[in-house]
Each structure stands twice: as structure tokens, then as C-alpha cells.
Image: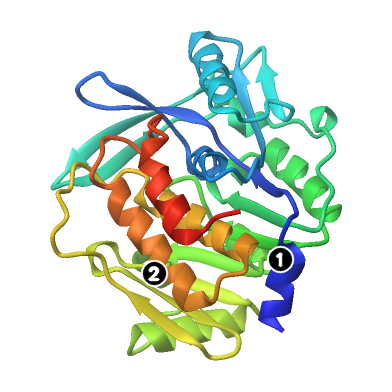
């Protein structure tokens, strides 16, 4: 049944809903960011032409973002411009090699307007995180999109204090088919058991999911589907790590690509880990270097 669902999603547009922002690093470098944007950026490089839905401010950063997206080939059809709120900016600090984020309130992506949405109906994949749903206005816009969507929903959990609550997360989980979160988030949502696999099994059953993916940082990741298939992957032990910002988004992008391409779960997970591992060898969550993607496209026979 899962394979049939994957096949049905093939050749349908991937809709990405969520935040676009600038990651501001301690050395002054600014890098395009936001989980949803990072995922869309990678999918564009993999020639999937995602429909990206977000909102930027009428400001210099927003103009820079839209220019970069256009140059990358991304459609701007559902990139809204907000006259009253700034383009999102996140201050990134690195503590023991791990990124820490200062996320501001009332950013443009909090005000994605239902009235300004273009056509997004379809039977392909719909991706969303949890951060961009923290404001009721963006949440209402997402609800409108979800109501007209007949395909699978992929939820990428991103618990950033104080911008989440358990009731809202569980409500969004109830409509998802695929869910990705990290091990700490799995525990925060109250499903800790004696083993990771047992915790995942309980979580998957509680939320009636097709597939649950749990990332564990340097230890790799695990996936469990509703047929009981359990897959574990680990990164190479010989990586030269520059920073880990966006590694989870790189992982998510390849999961979506794999669903779109109809890859078996073990293949999808191995490729997602390989791409995420490659992403941590560079600064920032995205790259404008198409050569970074070409080896993967060739080896994976991406169409």
C-alpha cells in the first residue's frame, strides 16, 4: 500500500509551506535559511520545481532573497511581500559545534496571507514545519491549503522554545502521513520508551502515520513505517565538519525527493544520510554551487 501511495505522488508538484529568512552568523556572514526554504532550495537543485509558499518583507533582505531565488530558478508565484513586517532574521551562534538560534517574533513569514495565495491544489506532496505555524494568520493560510490538498502531508517538526505548544503540534501530527523529528523532540512530545524503536513504534501508532523518521545527530537516523519496516543509517566517520546548520533540512529534502521518485525506504534513508553528511562539510544550510548536487543526481538517476 505504501508503494502505491508513493507511485501516486510521482510527477506531482511538491508544495513547500513555511519560513524563509536570513541566518546571521557570528562572523557577520548572512546565509539564506529557514527550514522550509532550505528544503525548497535543495529540491529546486534536484530539478523538482517545488511550489514554495512564504512571505518576505519589503526590505533589502527580502529583495536579496527574491533575487537569489529567481536566479536559482525558483518560482516566486507564492512568495508574498509584506509591507509591515520584516523579512525573517535569525541570529545563529555555535556552541560546541551545535547551532543555537535566536528567533524573533512577528516576522514576515508569520503573516502568510490566505487572500494572497495562488493555486496550490494538488495530489502530490505537501511539506510544512511547525515554526511557520506559530502565528494564527499563517496557520489559517496553511489550513486553507491543507483543505484543498488530496495527497500526502510531510511534517518536519521543529520545536524552538518558546514558539510551540504540545496541543498544536499534536493537532498537526493528526493530519500528517510522514513525520520527521529529532530524538530530543521525540522525548519532548512524551513518547519515551526503553528503546528508540519502541518509542518510534508508539509515536507512529498514536498519530496513525505512514512513516516516522527520527534523526540522532552524529549517530545517524532511523525510520519506521506502518508495515513494521525499520531502517537505521549512520554517517561516515571521516567527515570534515564545518557546521551542522541545515543538516536536518538536507535530510528532509532527500526524503521528499525519494517519495517523489518512488525509492524504497532503505534506499531513501541511505541517500538522505549521504546528502546530509555532505551538507555539514560546508558553511550554512544551502549552497549556490550546482556542482555540489551533480554527483548525487547522476548516482541516484534523479528524473
**Residue sitting nearer the eye, 270 or 211:** 270
Q: Is residue 117 left or right of residue 105?
A: right
The structure residue drawn at horizontal position 55% and vertical position 66%, both measured from the top left corner, is 179
Judged left or right of residue 128, residue 42 is left
Along the viewing direction, whichever of 62 and 277 lies nearer the viewer: 277
Location of mark 1 (residue): 175
Residue 270: assigned label: 2
Q: Position of 218 compared to 102: left or right?
A: left
Residue 17 appears in the picture as rendered? yes
Residue at 69% across, 38% down: 138
Question: What secondary structure is found at the residue carrying circle 1?
Answer: loop
Q: Callout 2 environment at 10 Å: few (<14), some (14 to 19), or many (20+)?
A: many
Q: Which residue is drawn at 71% across and 66% down?
A: 175
Residue 89: quarter of image: top left
Location of the N terminus by quadrant is: bottom right
Q: Position of residue 38 (x, y in %)?
A: 48, 40
Mark 1 and mark 2: Cα distance apart in space: 27 Å
Amino acid at each position: 500500500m505504501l508503494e502505491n501511495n508513493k507511485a501516486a505522488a510521482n510527477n506531482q508538484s511538491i508544495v513547500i509551506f513555511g519560513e524563509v529568512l536570513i541566518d546571521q552568523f557570528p562572523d557577520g556572514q548572512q546565509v539564506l535559511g529557514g527550514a522550509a526554504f532550505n528544503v525548497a532550495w535543495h529540491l529546486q537543485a534536484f530539478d523538482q520545481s517545488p511550489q514554495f509558499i512564504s512571505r518576505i518583507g519589503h526590505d533589502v533582505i527580502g529583495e536579496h532573497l527574491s533575487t537569489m531565488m529567481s536566479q536559482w530558478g525558483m518560482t516566486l508565484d507564492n512568495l508574498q511581500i509584506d509591507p509591515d513586517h520584516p523579512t525573517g532574521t535569525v541570529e545563529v551562534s555555535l556552541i560546541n559545534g551545535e547551532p543555537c538560534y535566536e528567533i524573533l517574533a512577528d516576522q514576515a513569514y508569520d503573516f502568510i496571507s490566505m487572500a494572497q495565495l495562488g493555486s496550490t491544489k494538488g495530489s502530490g506532496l505537501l511539506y510544512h514545519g511547525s515554526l511557520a505555524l506559530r502565528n494564527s494568520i499563517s496557520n489559517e493560510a496553511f489550513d486553507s491549503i491543507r483543505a484543498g490538498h488530496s495527497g500526502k502531508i510531510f511534517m518536519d517538526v521543529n520545536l524552538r522554545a518558546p514558539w510551540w505548544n504540545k496541543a498544536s503540534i499534536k493537532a498537526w501530527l493528526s493530519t500528517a502521513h510522514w513525520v520527521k523529528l529529532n530524538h530530543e523532540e521525540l522525548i519532548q512530545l512524551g513518547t519515551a520508551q526503553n528503546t528508540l524503536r519502541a518509542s518510534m513504534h508508539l509515536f507512529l501508532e498514536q498519530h496513525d502515520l505512514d512513516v516516522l523518521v527520527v534523526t540522532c545527530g552524529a549517530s545517524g537516523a532511523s525510520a519506521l513505517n506502518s508495515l513494521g519496516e525499520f531502517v537505521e543509517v549512520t554517517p561516515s566517520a571521516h567527515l570534515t565538519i564545518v557546521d551542522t546548520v541545515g543538516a536536518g533540512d538536507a535530510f528532509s529534502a532527500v526524503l521528499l525527493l525519494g517519495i517523489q521518485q518512488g525509492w524504497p525506504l532503505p534506499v531513501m534513508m541511505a541517500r538522505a544520510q549521504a546528502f546530509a553528511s555532505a551538507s555539514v562539510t560546508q558553511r550554512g544550510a544551502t549552497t549556490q554551487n550546482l556542482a555540489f548536487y551533480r554527483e548525487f543526481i547522476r548516482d541516484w538517476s534523479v528524473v
